Amino acid sequence: MMVNEHDALGKAPKNFLVPYILLILREVPVHGYELIQRLTVLGFPGVDRGNVYRMLRQLEQDHYVQSTWSTASAGPAKREYSLTESGEAYLHIYADELERYQSMLSQFFRMYGSFVQLYNPFFGTPADSPENPEKKSIRRNDEDDPT
């Protein structure tokens, strides 16, 4: 099944918010609305509120997050979420996993950059053409050496 490229653009992968939620809750207990505001500041504009609350419920069922009712502010009671010890351990595991992904992504972009530079004519404008002065193809030092 092919993914519609327009649907995938600009959206975080599934469960990508989880480590951010855990990280925010490690810093300070917050209610759902404040959590969504903090996610927006971290670069997740237009985050689906329902999705965040579903994730919080699942994290609570998995014992990574706990919630209590807070009546500290004016108005109705709000459910405030905080990280548990299990959640802290899970955050460290998630961070290790993301570090591995970061390494894999770095390798991908190095390979992709080399591919684009080497095979740029396939994509349209050759890397060394006058129409594309800012792009330079990769030149190896041994290219001039016939041996």
Image (cartoon, helix red, strand yellow):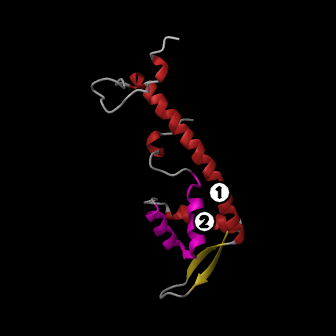
Secondary structure of the residue carrying tag 2 is: helix
Mark 1: few/some/many CA within 10 Å (<14, 14-19, 20+):
some
- Which residue is pictured at 49% across the width and 11% down the height? 146
- Chain-order first, disc 2 or disc 1: 2
Q: Quadrant of residue 15?
A: bottom right
- Which residue is pictured at 63% across the width and 80% down the height? 68
Residue 82 picture location, percent across and down: 62, 74
Q: Is residue 13 above or below residue 76?
A: above
- Which residue is pictured at 65% across the width and 65% down the height? 59
Residue stretch rendered in magenta on the structure: 14-42
CA gap between label 2 and label 1 equals 10 Å
Q: Quadrant of residue 90?
A: bottom right
Chief SS of the magenta region: helix
Residue beneath disc 2: 22
In the depicted view, which residue is nearer to us: 121 or 8?
A: 121
Q: Is 137 placed left or right of 18 in the picture?
A: left
Q: Is residue 76 above or below residue 60?
A: below
Q: Does 32 lie within the magenta span?
A: yes
Q: Is 131 placed left or right of 137 in the picture?
A: left
Q: Is 126 placed left or right of 8 in the picture?
A: left
Residue beneath disc 1: 94
Amino acid tagged 1 = Tyr
Give residue 82's mark.
Answer: none
Amino acid tagged 2 = Leu
Task: Return the residue found at the far top.
Answer: 146
Secondary structure of the residue carrying tag 1 is: helix
- Which residue is pictured at 45% across the width and 64% down the height? 40
Q: Is residue 92 above or below residue 3?
A: below
Which image quarter holds the N terminus? top right
Q: Does 22 lie within the magenta span?
A: yes
Residue 89 picture location, percent across and down: 70, 64
Task: Return the residue found at the far left.
Answer: 130
